[in-house]
Amino acid sequence: MTADLLTPSASADPYALFATLRAEDPVHWSDAHRAWLLTRYDDVSAAFQNKAFSNDRVRPVLARRQASGEPTAADRVLGLLSGWMVVNDPPVHTRLRKLAAGAFKGQRIAAMGEQISAIVDEHLDAFLAGSGPQDLVSEVAYPLPATVIATMLGAPAGDRDRFRDWSDELALVAFGTGGAARAERHERALRGLQEMDAYFRELVARRRAEPGEDMLSALMAREDEDRLTDDELVAMCALLLFAGHETTTNSIANATLALLRHPEQLARLRADPELLAPAVEELLRFDGPIKVLNRWVVADTVLGGRTIRAGQRVHLVLASANRDPAKFADPDVLDLARSPNPHIAFGKGIHACIGAQLARMETRVAVGRIVERLPGLSLEQEPVWKDALASRSMETLVVRHS
Amino acid sequence: MRITVDSTVCEAHGQCGVVDMDLFPLDDDGYSAVGPDAEVPAGEEDTALLGIAACPVRALRVL
Ligand code: HEM
Ligand code: SF4
């Protein structure tokens, strides 16, 4: 057997395929993906700690391209991405993560609660003003995190729509493209990202001159010697947008879908708002935003009797690990009060999501307000899932609120 | 306030470190390096409680 996660049926519901892989071939070579698929909780967990699996996967691509001639627009964008902490190993990663950590401190995020509630309510007001079938993704889940990130970085309100476009363009470039049909879109995305680069550069200059209460100012403020350069700050803005947008969109949309499909759990949450925090953890476990994370193999490794060679790729299947019966009792049951709940939707180890507290807050506020303000919410039609490997992502989630 | 980590329970989820890397240091493999008995600086108690609550396996607690 060779597993293909990109068939329409696997995109719509990958969990049966994951169960088969976990049981029959937990360290699986997939010809379709030309990568190893790790599907058991313990193997994925251990892989986060295994130094043979590297996150440094953009720099080698960039080096190969640069060796072959003049730098193009694509090289310049790849240059920006190659500086992201998420595609670096220690010690480069350690330094960037440490410099960014101050801006994500729990207290700073907690202080953003009211601002986030206001943004959520603004989007729900617009949604409630509509009637009949409406797409919760395009109306709420998709615009919301872009607005939060723009606000957080201290960008003027009028610029927020541009953040959404840039986020799409980043995803297109970062996840690569196949086939000539997409080449033109790729070119357009690169042009958009040059505009983004210039925009963030200006924002950085403005905050340097006039620091505020925003996260960008916090990223700049350092007492000690080492600090982020302007180039690094621009790359950081792009990373926060890339890492914090689609993930949170999917977290809100997938959570809402899971609740609509489990009316008894939805009723339980309505009756007991105290359940919100554990409920969001369970919803992230049950159908989280990230299906697969990628690692490069930098040293031969034997795992489950298989030899994984340097130069190959490994896919850590988070969505499968989170349904592993060896770790979670009744893993396919949605139990909003599940505790403890050591899901790995936010990854694990040194790269564990630095935005996790913010993402939790956004998802809690959004799900809490949706449940409270849309008592008549119902699913209008079966959602359409994107054929995406990395993310568990709906094209649309058509619902009605009355 | 004093806090502790049960290192037999910690699974290196790193969620405490996300809340505050100074209060909840992690070792090179991502396990908590809080140790058996750590003092929380005055004024940081609320942050410490946030970090403790963020641990999915309840490895951290107030002493
Ligand atoms: C529910 C929403 C989210 C999920 C499920 C999620 C998940 C993840 C995961 C699994 C990783 C680890 C990647 C790896 O190991 O290769 C990660 C890293 C990261 N996330 Fe998130 N994320 C979410 C929201 C956010 C938000 C809102 C932000 C910031 C605005 C953010 C910023 C980051 C950054 C900067 C990294 C890289 C950390 C590092 O390499 O050390 N994420 N995220
Ligand atoms: S959150 Fe809990 S499991 Fe994770 S590192 Fe901290 S103490 Fe350990």
Image (spheres, coloured by chain):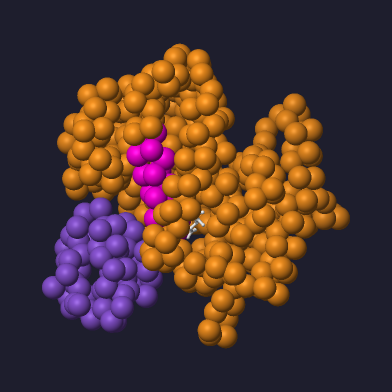
Chain colours: A orange, B purple
State whether residue A282 appears in this view: yes
Dividing the picture into quadrants, the one containing residue B62 is: bottom left
Residue A194 percent across, percent down from the top left: 78, 51
State whether residue A292 appears in this view: no
Q: Is residue A263 shown above or below A295?
A: above
Residue found 54% across the figure and 32% down from its top: A126
Residue B7 percent across, percent down from the top left: 19, 66
Left or right: residue A194 compared with residue A330: right
**Residue furthest to the left:** B63
**Residue furthest to the right:** A70
Quadrant including the N terminus of chain A: top left
Q: Magenta residues, as a range? A: A353-370
Q: Is residue A375 shown above or below A60?
A: above
Residue B60 percent across, percent down from the top left: 20, 64
Residue found 57% across the figure and 81% down from its top: A226
Q: Quick one: A151 or A60, which is closer to the camera?
A: A151
Residue A373 percent across, percent down from the top left: 38, 32
Q: In the rendered structure, does residue A363 fall within the stretch colored magenta? A: yes
Dividing the picture into quadrants, the one containing residue A276 is: top left
